[in-house]
Amino acid sequence: MIFSAFGLLVFMNTNAQRIDYTSTFRQLDAPSYFRFHYDNDYFTKQDQYYTQGITMEYVNPYLHKFPLAILLYKPFATPAQYGLTFNLFGYTPTSILSDSILYGDRPFDANISMQFFSWQTDTVRKRKMSATLSLGVMGKAAQGYEIQYNIHKWLDNPLPHGWQYQIKNDLILNYQLDYEKQLLSAANHFLLNATAEVRLGTLNNKLNTGINFMAGRFNDRYLPLPAAKRKAEYYFYGQGRLNGVVYDASLQGGLLNRKSPYSIASANINRLVFQADAGIIVNFRTIYLSYTQSFITREFTSGSNHRWGGVSVGFAL
């Protein structure tokens, strides 16, 4: 469940569906900031499937000089914000105590990636577009077994078994576009958005659409950052998304390396998956805190629904 204290410092992974750092409800009203996000199903008293996710995020306008910036789609005339993340995600079956393949269960998988992203806000039509480029590795190279083994040994917990059957090493190269459009706003106390997303690459290929909302006290999400003095924020948010899944390498194995000892067959992948997230955010202008609970319907036919929680801490720079 908890991979390793060492992993917290050194490793990070990606599956962009898990941590929505470009969404309006996660916006930190500062041109430059650092944010740390940690997911774990420990928060929901589970220990399976998506078991841990860590993201370290850095946003700075000078990242527009990064060579890959030219690859990020920027359709609006307004200035773009740029950021980098370093990520680690881990996935396990329902038990880590078996030395045999658990057929019909989720395969072991871990992956590490760096993501470079940008977003723009159309202040007139109340729209937001973000683009994300992911580059990394999945499989044994991501050190999932080593991290989990060390933390379990340190805590004197049962040592993990079964990682020898994890998804084989493969390249992560993914491109993602996210779109939000304001549907309803009430005096910066309530905001309702329509959302859409598309992902293409070696990690996952999918489309999703949904809605999100914010309720509480918050700054106008569709104003440029320097436009007004920002107030402290405290609000509740929720979102629901229906995902159309074409390919998921964390379940089906890498697209380039097809030699994984065990993976979920294409016929057993659920093509429509619903995910809901809800949380509380407090933003003191320079310090950002959040707590989130997430739910996802079963991703493969013999699987089950899954829940996890997450916490974030951010600092304006």
Image (cartoon, grey):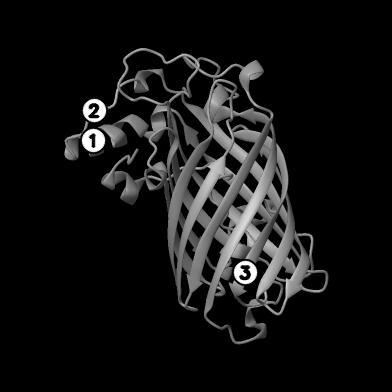
Q: Quick check: 206 left or right of 88?
A: right
Residue, disc 1: 152
Question: Which residue is at 51% across, 43% downward?
Answer: 14
The kind of residue on which mark 2 rests is Leu
- The first of marks 2 and 3 along the sequence is 2
Structural crowding at the residue carrying mark 2, measured as other residues with C-alpha within 10 Å and reported as few (<14), some (14–19) or many (≥20): some
In the picture as drawn, the residue positioned furthest to the bottom comes out as: 229
The answer to whether one can see residue 55 in this image is no
The kind of residue on which mark 1 rests is His
Residue, disc 2: 159
Which one is closest to the eye, mark 2 or mark 3?
3
- The first of marks 3 and 1 along the sequence is 1
- Residue 164: x, y in percent? 36, 19
Mark 2 and mark 3 residues within 8 Å of each other at the beta carbon:
no
- Residue 235: x, y in percent? 56, 70
Question: Which residue is at 52% across, 59% downward?
Answer: 279
